[in-house]
Image (spheres, rainbow, N blue to C red):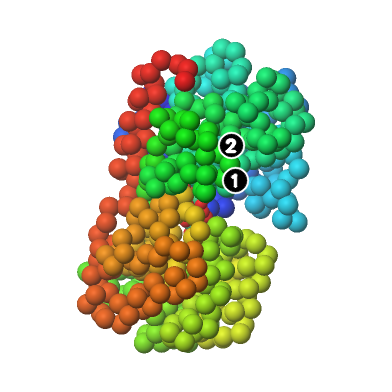
């Protein structure tokens, strides 16, 4: 079984959210199970630094594929955990600092269709008969819109043979471009139909993936069901319902080495379920680091999140008075929409010692919040899987979550966390009050903590589901 895992993010070098974590953690677990997985990812500046040119041989020089793409090359490297990487080297497209999708002003790069069109095209090339390298995948496993067109290239261009799987990490990001993009990326005009890559007058990378892939997965069973409803299908529910037989949900795992409270290199005080006292020391240290009053008689609420509408953090902002009155402390780490960034900065200024916020991306602080907070907040409007609630379960920081997507599949009300249904501040507050009441009762709290900490949240189980799916795809005749 040879699998190409195609991704636009891979932690720790390039990560804007959970996809980067998944791309770093799933392939090595599959490899440990005996599956030959290689990861295709753009040669971003951080990867260029980690795997310099003189140590990464060029394994293929790629032309422009008869489209408007710039020429590029594939380089081979091996990640520290042993996973083989195929680095897509294009100075023009990928040697840009910062966020992979946005320029310095916070707007999408204007050539994203070419950048991720090329990534998709190269993934398809690797899975096609044109690939004369010694290694050819049987399955091209794509992730989100950025590699979503690989299944379209595989199906629409002659001579291809690998099976295509697409995993939807977030249906909200679809990769939409004007009609001009179709010709520029070398897809035939015949694909411009409702039963192709066209979506309400746009070229949709994600729809291309969903339409042409041999199988579709998403990152939790509940989200797999939700996206087939008109309410949550983001315009793609009809297509997803039509493909229901090829669609399944496989819950993400977490990297239990990187996220292990006993061995976490970002923490000063390691702890486990039998030594929860050290968790208190992490709390005090976090309070100090964030300029909060060092008190252990108040619950500390933690948030680590992209600051977007999806995550429902405006509900927390709405409750600032009630949270202060609980009373509780609040620490927020996040970046994203300028308005929300401003809101949390202002909250921290308005209530010094009680609320704190760090606007930015900080891996170490994310770990210290998971460990130092008492209660983790994740009031998402929708959540395909969510990793942070799983980190918080593992760190003995019971989460308060909305019953949606992967949050509904991982958090059990009153057992390892607190769950509310309506996406309203009132519903969040009611759950939060229950959480704080439980926190004040040490016996109840330890039971909640222990349940989360003892859960098997690793990748072994999910990886075996992916392996079974690869197997099924390979053994089945082509076409769908
Ligand atoms: P999503 O992918 O929708 O952003 P997930 O919960 O799946 O949500 O994954 C988010 C990942 O990104 C987690 O690993 C989380 O710790 C990390 N993360 C999000 N925002 C930040 C931040 N500001 N600083 C550090 N890590 C962050
Ligand atoms: C997305 C989703 C998140 C999921 C992550 C990894 O960014 O928003 O819920 O955990 O991808 O699959």
In this image, 419 relative to 61: left or right? left
Whole-percent x and y of residue 238? 53, 36
The picture quadrant where one finds residue 362 is bottom right
Q: Residue furthest front?
A: 230
Q: In what quadrant of the picture does the N terminus appear?
A: top left
User: Which residue in the protein does label 1 denote?
Assistant: 173
Mark 2 vs 1, N-terminal side = 1
Residue at 34% over, 55% down: 410
Q: Is residue 203 above or below residue 282?
A: above
Q: Are marks 2 and 1 in contact (CB under 8 Å)?
A: yes
Residue 370, position as x, y percentages in the image: 42, 67
Circle 1 packing at 10 Å, graded few (<14), some (14-19), many (20+), is some
**Is any atom of residue 275 visible in this view?**
no
Residue 247 found in image quarter: top left
- Horizontal arrangement in the rendering, residue 434 relative to residue 39 (left or right): left
Q: Residue at x 57, y 45 (%)?
A: 234
Considering depth in this image, is 231 or 416 the residue closer to the camera?
Answer: 231
Q: Who's the residue at 52% across and 86% down the image?
A: 353
Pick the front one: 56 or 404: 404
Residue 163 makes an appearance in the image? yes
- Provide the residue designation for mark 2: 206
x and y percentages locating residue 449 in the rendered image: 28, 68
Q: CB of residue at label 1: within 8 Å of ligand 2? A: no
Residue 27, compared with residue 134, is above or below; it is below
Q: Residue at image x 42%, y 30%? A: 246
Cα separation, mark 2 vs mark 1, equals 8 Å
Q: Secondary structure at mark 2?
A: helix
- Relative image position of residue 408 (x, y in whole percent): 37, 55
């Amino acid at each position: 079984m040879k699998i190409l895992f195609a991704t636009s993010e891979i932690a720790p070098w390039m990560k804007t959210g959970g996809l980067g974590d998944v791309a770093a953690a799933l392939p090595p677990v599959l490899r440990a199970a005996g599956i030959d997985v290689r990861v295709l990812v753009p040669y971003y500046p951080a990867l260029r630094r980690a795997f310099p040119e003189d140590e990464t041989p060029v394994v293929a020089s790629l032309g422009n594929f008869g489209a408007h793409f710039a020429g590029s090359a594939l380089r081979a490297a091996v990640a520290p955990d042993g996973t083989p990487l195929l680095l897509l080297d294009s100075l023009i497209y990928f040697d840009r600092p910062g966020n992979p999708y946005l320029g310095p002003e916070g707007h999408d790069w204007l050539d994203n269709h070419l950048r991720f069109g090329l990534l998709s095209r190269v993934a398809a090339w690797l899975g096609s008969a044109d690939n004369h390298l010694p290694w050819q995948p049987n399955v091209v496993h794509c992730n989100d819109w950025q590699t979503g067109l690989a299944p379209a290239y595989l199906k629409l261009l002659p001579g291809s043979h690998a099976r295509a799987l697409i995993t939807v990490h977030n249906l909200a990001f679809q990769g939409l471009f004007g009609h001009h993009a179709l010709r520029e990326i070398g897809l035939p005009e015949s694909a411009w139909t409702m039963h192709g890559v066209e979506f309400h007058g746009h070229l949709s990378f994600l729809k291309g993936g969903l339409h042409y892939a041999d199988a579709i997965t998403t990152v939790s069973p509940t989200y797999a069901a939700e996206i087939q409803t008109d309410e949550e299908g983001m315009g793609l529910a009809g297509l997803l319902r039509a493909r229901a037989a090829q669609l399944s949900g496989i819950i993400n795992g977490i990297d239990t080495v990187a996220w292990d409270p006993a061995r976490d290199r970002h923490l000063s005080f390691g702890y486990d379920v039998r030594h929860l006292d050290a968790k208190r020391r992490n709390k005090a240290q976090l309070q100090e680091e964030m300029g909060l009053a060092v008190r252990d008689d108040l619950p500390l609420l933690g948030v680590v999140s992209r600051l977007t509408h999806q995550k429902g953090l405006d509900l927390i902002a709405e409750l600032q008075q009630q949270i202060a009155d609980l009373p509780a402390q609040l620490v927020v780490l996040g970046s994203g929409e300028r308005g929300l960034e401003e809101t949390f900065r202002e909250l921290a200024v308005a209530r010094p010692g009680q609320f704190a916020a760090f606007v930015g991306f900080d891996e170490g602080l994310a770990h210290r919040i998971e460990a130092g907070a008492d209660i983790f907040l994740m009031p998402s409007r929708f959540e395909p899987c969510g990793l942070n609630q799983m980190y918080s379960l593992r760190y003995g920081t019971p989460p308060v979550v909305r019953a949606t997507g992967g949050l509904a599949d991982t958090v059990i009300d009153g057992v390892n966390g607190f769950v509310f249904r309506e996406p309203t501040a009132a519903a969040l507050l009611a759950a939060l009050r229950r959480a704080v009441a439980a926190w004040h009762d040490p016996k109840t709290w330890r039971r909640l903590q222990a349940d989360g900490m003892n859960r098997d949240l690793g990748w072994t189980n999910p990886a075996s589901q992916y392996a079974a799916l690869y197997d099924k795809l390979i053994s089945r005749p082509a076409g769908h």
